[in-house]
Image: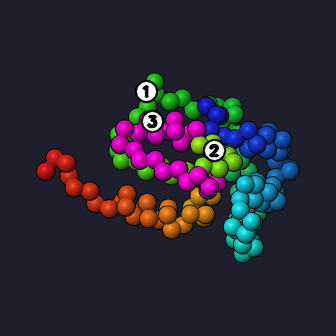
């Protein structure tokens, strides 16, 4: 089940104890694989302020820690039958593109868009293209039964 989390993220989670958690940890993790200048000092200031709230860093890590100890049990043949738009950065450092390929197979009405040069922060790197795909996907579609 943890195959969707990059090994570098798992290594960080396993090495960090509650007393080690600080905003620098998440700043370093966020910068990994991000193009230079993608996040401004103002962006990081806002993130650091949020990450410094009591319990916030622990809560962020606990989701991943829980996966290490309590794997999610999926139905034998999971499928999402509603329309799905899956957008993925081809250079995602945390969630490999192979997860996108496996995920879209579970969506019979799914559309997959891989952005080859983008990373984990796709919505920051490809703002115009992500927006264009979302607008197109969310447009009302004709009812096939009418």
Q: 10 Å neighbourhood of mark 2: few (<14), some, or many (≥20)?
A: many
Q: Name the residue located 65 percent from the left edge and 34 percent from the top edge.
A: 2
Q: For this rendering, which residue is in front, 14 or 86?
A: 86
First along the sequence among labels 2 and 3: 2
Q: Position of residue 32 (x, y in %)?
A: 75, 55
**Dot 1 corresponds to which residue?**
77
Q: Position of residue 83 (x, y in %)?
A: 36, 47
Q: Quadrant of residue 1?
A: top right
Q: For this rendering, which residue is in front, 119 or 40?
A: 119
First along the sequence among labels 1 and 3: 1
- Picture colour scheme: rainbow
Evaluate if marks 2 and 1 touch, with contact meaning CB atoms under 8 Å apart.
no
In the image as oriented, which residue stretches furthest toward the right? 19
Q: Is residue 53 visible?
A: no
Q: Is residue 34 above or below residue 9?
A: below
- Marks 2 and 1, how far apart at CA: 22 Å
Secondary structure found at label 1: loop
Q: Is residue 8 visible?
A: yes
Side of 40 relative to 145 (left or right): right
Evaluate if marks 2 and 3 touch, with contact meaning CB atoms under 8 Å apart.
no
Q: Is residue 112 magenta?
A: yes
Side of 60 relative to 136 (left or right): right
Q: Position of residue 53 (x, y in %)?
A: 73, 63
The range drawn in magenta is 98-120
**Dot 3 corresponds to which residue?**
105
Number of the front mark, 2 or 1: 2
Q: Name the residue located 51 percent from the left edge and 68 percent from the top edge.
A: 128
Q: Which mark is residue 95?
A: 2
Q: Is residue 27 magenta?
A: no
Secondary structure found at label 2: loop
Q: 10 Å neighbourhood of mark 3: few (<14), some, or many (≥20)?
A: some
Q: Name the residue located 61 percent from the left edge and 56 percent from the top edge.
A: 118
């Amino acid at each position: 089940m943890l195959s969707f989390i990059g090994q570098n993220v798992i290594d960080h989670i396993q090495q960090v104890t509650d007393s080690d958690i600080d905003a620098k940890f998440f700043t370093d993790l966020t910068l990994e694989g991000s193009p230079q200048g993608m996040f401004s000092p103002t962006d990081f200031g806002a993130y650091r302020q949020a990450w410094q709230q009591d319990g916030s860093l622990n809560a962020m890590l606990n989701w991943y820690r829980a996966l290490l100890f309590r794997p999610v049990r999926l139905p034998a043949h999971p499928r999402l039958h509603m329309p799905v738009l899956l957008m993925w950065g081809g250079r995602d450092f945390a969630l490999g593109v192979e997860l996108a390929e496996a995920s879209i197979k579970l969506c019979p009405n799914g559309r997959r868009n891989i952005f080859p040069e983008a990373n984990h922060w796709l919505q920051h790197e490809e703002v115009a293209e992500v927006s264009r795909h979302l607008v197109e996907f969310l447009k009302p579609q004709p009812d096939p039964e009418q």
